[in-house]
Amino acid sequence: MSTLLFDLRYTLRLLMRSPAFTALCITVIALAISLALTIYVVVGNQGIKPLPIPHGDRYVALMLQDKETYRILRGDRINAFIYQTFQQRLQSYQLLGAANIHRTITTSDDGIAEAEAGASITPNLLQATQAIPLLGRNLVASDAEIGAAPVALIGYEQWQNYYAGRKDIIGHLSRIDGQARTIVGVMPQNFGFPTDHHIWTPLQLPSNADPSNNSFRLTIIGILKKGTSVEQADSELKALIAQLANEYPDEYGHLSARTQPYIYAASANDWGTMNIVMLTAAGIILLLACLNVGNLLLVRANERTQELVIRSALGGSRQRIIQQVLMESFIICFVGGVIGLWLGSFGADYVRYQTEIVVGSSFLPFWMSFDIGPDIFLLTIAATLLVWLLAGGIPAWRASQLDINSALSGGGKGVTGKGNSKVAKGLVAVEVVCSFFLLVLSGAFVSSVHFANQIDYGVDTNNYISGFVNIREDAYPEDTDRVQFFTDLRTTLVQNPAIEAASFTNALPGMGYWRSPYNVEDRDLQSNNHYPNLIMIPIDQEYF
């Protein structure tokens, strides 16, 4: 122990005698680790980490896709009959539930209306999260029975903002989506399952749904049985939907199906390729830090050759010399890791700030976390150890090759000058290759962002404002009712002297679209049993 303490004190004195060298090595490691942690925070929120609820790694979404175009039909696209058939026939799931999640629920008490993201959901999905309500109770199976008393569950934010945190909220009768509902519970703060929801009502489905009845448009969420892979569940689902297509060709003949990890499906993006690119960039950054610091330590070890040889000649063991060299790199890596973790926390806060600007804090999915949690600490430790072993291992290995006779006869030229020179050249060569690769990745990413921001939409976008309108199907059941609603809304808007014109569409330019197969009247474009598809954006007559 005394030997270890002596080497520690000696190493600290050496580092303090070379403050520029020490500061440079620590800075390189700190910046590399902080960048890697920031990238991990971004990637972790896009699917490489499981949902922060029990069995979160086994949550999947069961989705329909067009058999001809293979386009996934995102959103609430599954009717009650398909859901009930899935429940009865699929064997890969520990639990299967349904929800109408792509909707806005309006609360309107005392003439004050407020719209929030809400979901009509089967109670078993909420119960599976094992979230304990802050007040009252959770939704239960009896709430979802046809004819049950109308109830609602609200989130903590909704309770504080709309209801001003009133203490007698449980049992309060509130007008939610045009219906008087009794509030039975308040969920904990930051709970937003399935994504960013703040109001939940029980999903009441008929016991024997009709295959052609599409009045219920659902998203199906499942928890895989332990040991069941997504691929196995996907094969079973595809086989079942093929059976339904044969049994009901008019209703389901054009459909196939796909099972996806829940986070990928809920974010409506396939982040797989982007995650790989970003994780590759993080790995290259750490590797560059290892090579840079390793090269610096190798040069320093070469400068200390005479000192190490003399220590060896005076009786210092090879193990003791290697230990001293490794201790120097360990102290540098430890301090760099601590500073990197501190800087990484600022990076995570910056990502949170930018994300909230773009998305809005109330619209962030509940699984998005920008806090420095245990996984970040473990990653920091792993990254620090990796940098230490790679950066410190090279000079330690070279120190272990010391030849006392050659060193003493070679004077101040150093023992392993030629050997160290070859290793240093090799490290520099690898650094150049990695730096070039990282530069290409960074350039491609920056260019894509730049071009995305410079897209010419063909019109002057100044003085344009947009808003989102969601109308309830039960209040406007017929197409003519919905058309009349939007016609009246346009008339009201253009009467405002500050508004010159108004139009309606389902997507702003560059912010979403549908792909739809098409054909032409004078010839059949079908090829290999598939029709070509094109991007389609529904608009009204005033759009252009």
Image (cartoon, helix red, strand yellow):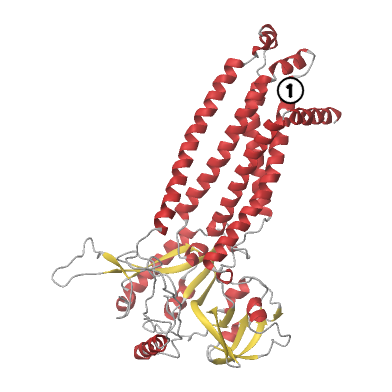
Residue 168: image quadrant is bottom right
Residue 121 visible here: no
- Residue under the point 59% across and 20% down: 420
- Residue under the point 19% across and 65% down: 525
Dot 1: element: helix
Q: Residue furthest left?
A: 522
As displayed, is residue 517 above or below residue 330? below
Q: Residues within 10 Å of mark 1 (few under 14, many from 20)?
A: many
Residue 504: image quadrant is bottom left
Identified by mark 1, the residue type is Ile
Q: Residue furthest front?
A: 497
Residue 385: image quadrant is top right
Residue 195 percent coordinates (x, y): 55, 70
Left or right of residue 206: residue 22:
right
- Residue under the point 51% across and 80% down: 104
Residue 312 percent coordinates (x, y): 75, 16
Q: Which residue does the numbered mark 1 point to in the structure image?
A: 321
Q: Residue furthest top?
A: 409
In the picture, the quarter occupied by the N terminus is top right
As displayed, is residue 203 above or below residue 1? below
Left or right of residue 453: residue 410:
right
Tell which of 198 and 88 is nearer to you: 198
Residue 429 percent coordinates (x, y): 50, 28
Left or right of residue 408: residue 351:
left
In the picture, the quarter occupied by the C terminus is bottom left
Residue 180 percent coordinates (x, y): 58, 93
- Residue under the point 66% across and 41% down: 384
As displayed, is residue 154 above or below residue 41? below
